[in-house]
Image (cartoon, helix red, strand yellow):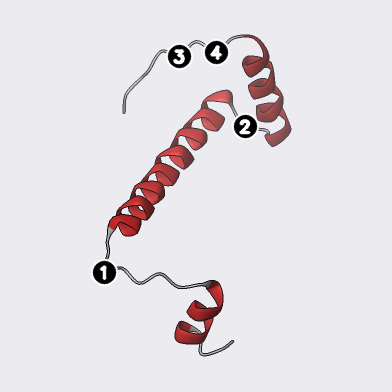
């Protein structure tokens, strides 16, 4: 585990404190979860970009996807 010094000031610190209080969690917990979600979203974004660049990757509308993989459900 790493310890990373972080300075959060002003409105962001106030908002972070409010959210932590409402969720009955620590600020550290909120920050860790935000970073975790950001990393997951970034990974998904990179996958999507790679798929868009792949000329052999099939692109379907939601209706086509439902018909092909959910058998019209």
Mark 1 vs mark 3: which is more N-terminal?
3
Q: Please tell me whether mark 1 sits on a helix, a strand or a loop.
A: loop
Q: CA distance from mark 2 to mark 1?
A: 46 Å
Residue 54 position, x and y percent, is 27, 61
Q: Which residue is mark 2?
A: 25
Q: Which residue is mark 4?
A: 8
> Within 10 angstroms of label 4, few (less than 14), some, or many (20 or more) residues?
few
Q: CA distance from mark 1 to mark 4?
A: 45 Å
* Contact, mark 3 vs mark 4 (Cβ under 8 Å): yes
Query: Which residue is pictured at 68% across the width and 33% down the height?
Result: 24
Instruction: Reply above or below: 62 against 35.
Output: below
Q: Nearer the viewer, mark 4 or mark 2?
A: 4
Q: Nearer the viewer, mark 1 or mark 4?
A: 1
Q: Nearer the viewer, residue 12 or 66?
A: 66
Q: Which residue is mark 1?
A: 56
Query: Which residue is pictured at 51% across the width and 84% down the height?
Result: 70
Instruction: Reply above or below: 60 against 13.
Output: below
* Contact, mark 4 vs mark 2 (Cβ under 8 Å): no
Q: Which residue is mark 3?
A: 6
Mark 2 vs mark 3: which is more N-terminal?
3
């Amino acid at each position: 585990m790493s310890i990373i010094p972080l300075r959060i000031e002003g409105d962001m610190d106030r908002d972070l404190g409010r959210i932590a209080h409402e969720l009955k969690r620590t600020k550290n917990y909120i920050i860790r979860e935000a970073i975790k979600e950001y990393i997951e979203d970034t990974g998904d974004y990179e996958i999507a970009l790679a798929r868009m660049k792949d000329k052999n990757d099939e692109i379907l509308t939601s209706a086509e996807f439902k018909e092909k993989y959910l058998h019209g459900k």
